[in-house]
Image (cartoon, rainbow, N blue to C red):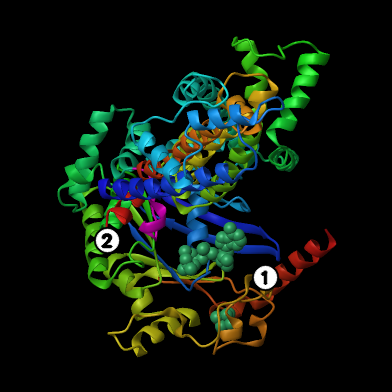
């Protein structure tokens, strides 16, 4: 049984300009001990998808559909068990958040509370979940700080975030995520705010953690280089959908989806000393408020066909793990797919 | 930190000096003499003025005053024969201080609670109602409220005493009159800073640890939300103490407020000056204390200022 299995997950935001479908029908799974990368341009729904798993969506966001199987239980707020019991959902999530499931955030400047001591911020989760005394929690916190490479941890325990450098703060955030030996850590661009040498240290640290502890990591990043260094497999996201999934080798040597190919090209053609950026694919990321009904990548796709605009392609498999959603690989089933989607559209229009 | 406090104290002394000088000369410019009454003869008037040194040139009077002041002596009242200003303050101020601090403490507790309530309620009608009420009460002067409360609860319903007795009951109306404005002010302040803090990233992080709602709200958010409150708390306390003068008069409370109003009516120069200097000192010290407490609450400030 996979540690995490996500089925048909969709997330919506209510905004002044209309409804934003930030995550659209996402499916993937993660085995114990696996390191999964999630890659995509800004706004593709990487963070929102994972915040939805954590149950930490902003107030205007909600999961409209989908199953989130974690550790054998469906922790989606729309699951049978929870859909009429939001309080029960809340209670259960508070039990596992920070314990079995924890998150490392992108910007250690803003995610640490500026007016609370570092020690307090590390120990509070331990005290809550492990039901241990303050002294016990402090001992563990200092050990954690040493584990993530913070020198003179004992002294620094009673300092405030502003007394730490960016890299040190990110180590603190990692220590907090690790504090209760979680089964899964979601790391949302943990290195983006840091300079290159610190980035490498943090990546090594995360790799060491996975090796030492029985932890899985989902690594959200813009940077294919980070994925190549760390992960076993990758989800490529575009406009709220996972358009391709595969092992590192699949994605780097046998990319199938035109968007993945574009990403790889943009990395290759870049001067390797410069910061690699994904936005070098011609065209702009899609406006989620004005998506076509078909493949969202169509306006920027060099291989686009007529059918791409109005109808969604289905996922096609390549080998054991890899799959990609592009009309080039599901053309044979075009009739079936098109009639299915037209039917659905018609019934939606009626209702 | 110590250097910063010394600097602020020095600035406070300079401010005090200007305050003393200006009030001194202003009271002398005020038309009329403190001893002028309808049936006083010019010779008696001259004798009285000589007795209190008012016949001397003004610069000499000023120097004498400063000299006495440096010895902590604020002079004697011209009107209440034989009563020193120090004595007036030492009997009246404890009453004023107690009233001010009680009303501030009440305002702090209630204001913070209402502020949090406004921020976390999901009912827009509750939030809107509280906001409107606070806007309304900010613009009502405390003496108007004092009169209204007195007429309603004291005279009409006869629930609470109208005149001061020093009992617990006689505190209720003046404290209420004094607390309403700071409650409105504090609740609005807490509401705006709390609603801002609630959307910060560190709240997401706190929630990601699985912490309970109480801890996230009362430790993580409130501690941040109180920083702006601490910056205004000092001046607010000073205002609570000094702003109660008219209310004291309405409820016949024997604090320094009553003395102040009397002294102005009577042209009792030394009392006016003594109380002005005293109140000025309180305001300056309150401001200094509030800056220090800011540094204690917000650890980031310490560093900036010690540099
Ligand atoms: N609270 C919100 N209200 C409305 N829209 C939102 C909200 N949060 C996110 N979105 C929208 O959801 C989409 C996906 O956002 P998300 O943060 O997941 O992007 P991302 O892939 O993590 O991008 P980045 O690389 O910039 O972090 C974006 O279009 C964003 O504007
Ligand atoms: S479905 Fe069409 S538009 Fe979308 S990626 Fe494939 S070819 Fe390009
Ligand atoms: Mg993101």
Q: Quadrant of residue A269?
A: bottom left
Task: Give how far across and how far down residue B164 sits, in percent.
Answer: 65, 13
Name above or below for residue B269 compared with residue A203.
above
Task: Give how far across and how far down residue A63 sits, in percent.
Answer: 60, 52
Q: Residue at x 56, y 71 (%)?
A: A239
Q: Quadrant of residue A128?
A: top left
Instruction: Give B49 or B177, whichever is nearer the viewer.
Output: B49
Residue A20 magenta-highlighted = no
Instruction: Give A311 or B23, whichever is nearer the viewer.
Output: B23
Q: Nearer the viewer, mark 2 or mark 1?
A: 2
**Quadrant location of ligand 2?**
bottom right
Label 1 neighbourhood size at 10 Å, few (<14), some (14-19), many (20+)? few
In the picture of the structure, the residue carrying the numbered disc 1 is A289
Give, as a single range, the part of the protein colored magenta: A102-116
Name above or below for residue B59 compared with residue B277.
below
Q: Residue at x 58, y 71 (%)?
A: A314
Task: Give how far across and how far down residue A137 sits, in percent.
Answer: 26, 33
Spatial distance from mark 2 to mark 1, Cα to Cα?
Answer: 37 Å
The numbered mark at residue A167 is 2
Task: Give how far across and how far down residue B71 sits, in percent.
Answer: 33, 32
Badge 2 element:
helix
Q: Is residue A279 left or right of residue B164?
A: left
| Chain letter belonging to callout 1 | A
Instruction: Give A183 or B50, whichever is nearer the viewer.
Output: B50
Seen as rendered, the residue at the extreme left is A152
């Amino acid at each position: 049984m996979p540690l995490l299995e996500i089925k048909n997950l969709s997330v919506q935001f209510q905004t002044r300009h209309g409804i934003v479908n930030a995550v659209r029908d996402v499916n993937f799974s993660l085995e114990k001990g696996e390191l999964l990368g999630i890659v995509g341009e800004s706004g593709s729904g990487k963070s929102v998808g994972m915040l939805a798993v954590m149950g930490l969506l902003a107030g205007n966001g909600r999961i409209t559909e989908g199953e989130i199987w974690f550790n054998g239980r469906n922790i989606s707020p729309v699951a049978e068990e929870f859909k009429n019991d939001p309080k029960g959902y809340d209670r259960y999530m508070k039990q596992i958040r920070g314990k079995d499931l924890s998150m490392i955030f992108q910007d250690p400047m803003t995610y640490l509370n500026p007016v609370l001591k570092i020690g307090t911020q590390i120990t509070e989760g331990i005290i809550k979940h492990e039901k241990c005394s303050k002294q016990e929690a402090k001992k563990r916190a200092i050990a954690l700080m040493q584990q993530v490479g913070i020198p003179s941890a004992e002294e620094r325990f009673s300092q405030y975030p502003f007394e730490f450098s960016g890299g040190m703060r990110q180590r603190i955030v990692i220590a907090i995520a690790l504090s209760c030996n979680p089964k899964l850590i979601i790391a949302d661009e943990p290195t983006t705010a840091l300079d290159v040498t610190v980035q490498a240290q943090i990546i090594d640290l995360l790799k060491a953690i996975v090796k030492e502890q029985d932890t899985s990591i989902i690594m959200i990043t813009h940077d294919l280089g980070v994925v190549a260094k760390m992960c076993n497999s990758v989800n490529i996201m575009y406009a709220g959908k996972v358009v391709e999934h595969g092992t590192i080798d699949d994605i780097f040597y046998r990319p199938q989806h035109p968007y993945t190919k574009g990403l790889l090209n943009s990395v290759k053609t870049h001067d390797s000393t410069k910061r690699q950026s994904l936005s070098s694919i011609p065209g702009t990321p899609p406006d989620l408020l004005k998506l076509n009904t078909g493949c969202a990548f169509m306006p920027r796709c060099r291989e686009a066909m007529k059918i791409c605009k109005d109808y969604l392609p289905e996922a096609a498999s390549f080998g054991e793990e890899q799959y990609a959603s592009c009309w080039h690989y599901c053309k044979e089933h075009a009739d079936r797919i098109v009639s299915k989607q037209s039917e659905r559209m018609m019934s939606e229009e009626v209702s | 930190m110590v250097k910063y406090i010394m600097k602020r104290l020095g600035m406070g002394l300079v401010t005090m000096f200007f305050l003393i000088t200006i009030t001194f000369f202003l009271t002398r410019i005020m038309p009329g003499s403190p001893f002028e009454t309808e049936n006083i003869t010019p010779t008696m008037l001259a004798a009285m003025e000589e007795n209190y040194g008012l016949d001397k040139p003004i610069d000499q009077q000023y120097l004498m005053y400063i000299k006495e002041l440096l010895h902590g002596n604020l002079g004697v009242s011209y009107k209440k024969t034989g009563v020193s200003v120090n004595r007036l303050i030492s009997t009246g101020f404890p009453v004023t201080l107690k009233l001010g601090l009680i009303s501030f403490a009440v305002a702090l507790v209630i204001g913070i609670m209402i502020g949090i309530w406004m921020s976390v309620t999901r009912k827009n009608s509750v939030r809107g109602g509280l906001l409107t009420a606070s806007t309304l009460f900010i613009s009502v002067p405390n003496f108007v409220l004092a009169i209204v409360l007195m007429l309603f609860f004291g005279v009409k319903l006869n629930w609470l005493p109208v005149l001061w007795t020093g009992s617990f009951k006689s505190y209720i109306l003046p404290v209420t009159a004094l607390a309403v404005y700071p409650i409105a002010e504090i609740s609005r302040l807490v509401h705006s800073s709390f609603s801002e803090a609630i959307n910060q990233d560190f709240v997401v992080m706190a929630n990601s640890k699985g912490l309970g709602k109480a801890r996230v709200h009362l430790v993580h958010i409130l501690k941040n939300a109180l920083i702006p409150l601490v910056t205004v708390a000092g001046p607010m306390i000073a205002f609570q103490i000094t702003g109660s003068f008219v209310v004291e008069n309405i409820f016949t409370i024997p604090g320094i407020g009553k003395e102040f109003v009397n002294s102005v009516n009577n042209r009792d120069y030394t009392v006016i000056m003594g109380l002005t200097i005293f109140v000025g000192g309180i305001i300056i010290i309150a401001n200094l204390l509030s800056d220090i407490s800011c540094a204690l609450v917000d650890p980031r400030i310490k560093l900036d200022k010690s540099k």
